[in-house]
Image (spheres, rainbow, N blue to C red):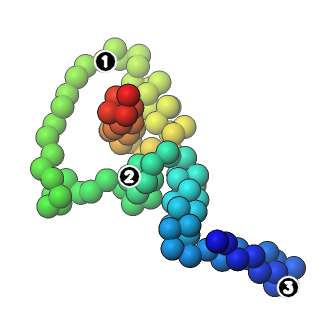
């Protein structure tokens, strides 16, 4: 259970164990505007490097109308992604999770 401490006009809430972990996860997800810790982690530290030992990567290519590119780049910027590739990866992962949880 959280312990509330008043110190010099400041309220401090002390949490431990699972309660502290859950609270911190919620703070991180709010900070990164995500709804799960995996996406929050990617938002904070970025995706693993292509050459990492975590998993081999592959290339998927597709064509879009030329007029879409600037719109997608604008959406990526609004979402806080630095590249279109990062934005599209995040959209794909988000949709994948939605389908898996349905």
Mark 1, mark 2: which one is toward the viewer?
A: 2
- Element type at marker 2? helix
For the residue pair 52 and 100, the one nearer the viewer reads as 100
- Residue 48 lies, in percent from the top left, at 27, 57
Label whose residue precedes the other's in the sequence (3 or 2): 3
Assign the N terminus to one quadrant of the image. bottom right
Report if residue 3 is visible in the image: yes
Kindly identify which residue carries mark 2.
38
Q: Residue at x 56, y 56 (%)?
A: 26
Q: Quadrant of residue 102?
A: top left
Judged from this view, the residue extending furthest toward the bottom is 8
Left or right: residue 86 versus residue 58 is right
- Residue 15 lies, in percent from the top left, at 61, 74
Judged from this view, the residue extending furthest toward the front is 1
- Give me the C-alpha separation between circle 3 and circle 2: 37 Å
Q: Residue at x 16, y 37 (%)?
A: 59
Left or right: residue 60 versus residue 23 is left
- Give me the C-alpha separation between circle 1 and circle 2: 28 Å
For the residue pair 99 and 72, the one nearer the viewer reads as 99
Label whose residue precedes the other's in the sequence (3 or 1): 3
Q: Residue at x 75, y 76 (%)?
A: 4
Kindly identify which residue carries mark 3.
8
Other residues around mark 1 within 10 Å, as few (<14) / some (14–19) / many (≥20)? few
Other residues around mark 2 within 10 Å, as few (<14) / some (14–19) / many (≥20)? few
Label whose residue precedes the other's in the sequence (1 or 2): 2
Kindly identify which residue carries mark 1.
64
Up-down relation of residue 102 to residue 2 (above or below): above
Left or right: residue 43 versus residue 20 is left
Q: Residue at x 35, y 17 (%)?
A: 66
- Element type at marker 1? loop
Report if residue 43 is visible in the image: no
């Amino acid at each position: 259970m959280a312990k509330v401490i008043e110190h010099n006009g400041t309220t401090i809430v002390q949490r431990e164990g699972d309660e502290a972990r859950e609270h911190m996860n919620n703070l991180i997800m709010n900070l990164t505007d995500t709804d799960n810790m995996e996406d929050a982690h990617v938002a904070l530290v970025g995706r693993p490097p292509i050459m990492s030992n975590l998993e081999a990567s592959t290339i998927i290519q597709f064509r879009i109308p030329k007029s879409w590119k600037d719109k997608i780049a604008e959406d990526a910027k609004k979402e806080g992604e630095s590249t279109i590739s990062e934005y599209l990866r995040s959209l794909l992962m988000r949709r994948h999770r939605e389908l898996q949880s349905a």
